Amino acid sequence: MIEIDQLHKKFGDTEVLKGISLTIAPGEVVSILGASGSGKSTLMRCMNGLAGLNGGSLLIDGLDVSKPRELREIRKRCATVFQHFNLYPHLSVLENITLAPIDVLGRKKAEVEAEAFALLKQVGLADRADAYPGQLSGGQKQRIGICRALAMQPRYLLLDEVTSALDPEMTGEVLDVLAALARSGTTMIFVTHEIAFAREISSRIVFLDDGVVRADMPTDRFFAEDGGYGDERIARFLAKMRNK
Amino acid sequence: MNFSAIIGYLGMFWDGFLVTASVSALSIAGSFIIGVIVAFGAVSRRPAVRRLARGYIGLFRNIPFIVQVFFFYFGLPEIGIYIDAFTTGTMALSIAVGAYAADVLRAGIENVDTGVIEAAEVSGLSRLKIYRRIILPIALRVSLRPLGSVFINLVLTTSILSTITLNELTGNAKIVASDTFRPFEVYFFLLLFYCVLTYLLSLLINLWHRHLNRFMRGAE
């Protein structure tokens, strides 16, 4: 369970998150939508402890992200996939995937490697285990990024605009992997601009606008005429995204 | 020109060579370790640590090496601290060259993509592991060549240790020169020795550089 209560975050004098409250239950697939600068990515960075809080609280399974010792535990349960992949350039694909499970979870190398191969197979990259990130295309890199996150066997998967740096063709291959994942029961939190995709796979939509939650409703309701579309700000956003 | 005059002294050259090589090897290791620690200090999030590390770099880059060696070897005994010439030389070189190594490494570390570091952080790796497994190998990839120049300079600087009675290459060569009255031949020979030593070192650095950059092969 992720419990966010009155979360505030400032960068210098600019308040980016102005009191966010959200609860996400295990197994939910939630998409966080909003225009650029609405605070989506910052909210995600607060969840994995990359950004500190300036007010309010953020608990994951009752653990407090602002306490270093509890954050360490949170990071074992909560994996992140990044917009720019952020693979380790000097490690092979296999090492990228197995580093943290071996080192952080203290698991056996042989076991983790076997799982890594299974994951690579799932994303269609079984033959690239020995390649280095520099030898892969963007779409391949991102699929490795997803494998690296999944190798931690996380309860929560945070996905921060994972297709924004990809061209449309590669976006498809990554979204296919994610759609399969969403059906598997992992709790997933998407920050995304892929409206159609969010609509297809998430059970709930949270719409951020200027640092506050403007809408938080089941996906069906969000896309209904009298739901999200009923809100003038959201309707404008959706119309704009559709024209892109 | 008469090189036959120095043939009888080849043993002395060899002894000197061994001293120079061991001081160099130990000081390269020492200065690298100091360099890594100080470089990470210089990019620390804690202002006090950062100031300390940058102060170290600033201080030792601004003292003539020979003055530093004299201070350790001739100054410290005045206050009751005696260290032999070999240890003094190794220590002084490690400390002084450590400052240069730190500065080169700091630049490499600052170049590492913050996104990659963040990925390591959120995966739960400890700070130390992130430094050792992620940041240092990536930073070394670009820092190794300039670091190589620093280390070659270190080898050349060992010649200064002849001034504190250490019988390394240059020290022994001076003795041979005054014994044989053949300074031209002796110092020509000395030049060759240093060239060979630094050339071997640059070969090693190239090999290491290639190893660190192996992942760049075939990259688009």
Image: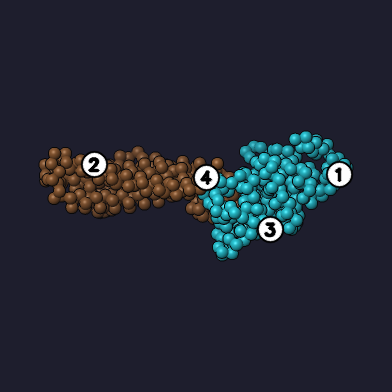
- To the question of a shared chain for discs 2 and 4, the answer is yes
In this view, the mark in front (4 or 1): 4
Callout 1 crowding tier (Cα within 10 Å): few <14, some 14–19, many ≥20: few
In this view, the mark in front (1 or 2): 2
Q: Type of residue at label 3?
A: Arg
Q: Earlier in the sequence, mark 2 or mark 4?
A: 2
User: Numbered disc 1: what chain?
Assistant: A
Residue with the mark numbered 3 = A155
In this view, the mark in front (2 or 4): 4
Callout 4 crowding tier (Cα within 10 Å): few <14, some 14–19, many ≥20: few
Tell me where residue B153 sits by quadrant.
top left
In the foreground, B82 or A31: A31
Q: Residue A50, percent across and down?
A: 61, 48
Residue with the mark numbered 1 = A224
User: Numbered disc 4: what chain?
Assistant: B
Callout 3 crowding tier (Cα within 10 Å): few <14, some 14–19, many ≥20: some
Residue with the mark numbered 4 = B218
Q: Residue B119, percent across and down?
A: 59, 49
Q: Residue at x 71, y 55 (%)?
A: A181
Q: Residue at x 50, y 45 (%)?
A: B217
Mark 4–mark 1 Cα distance, whole angstroms, equals 50 Å
> Which quadrant is the N terminus of chain B positioned in?
top left
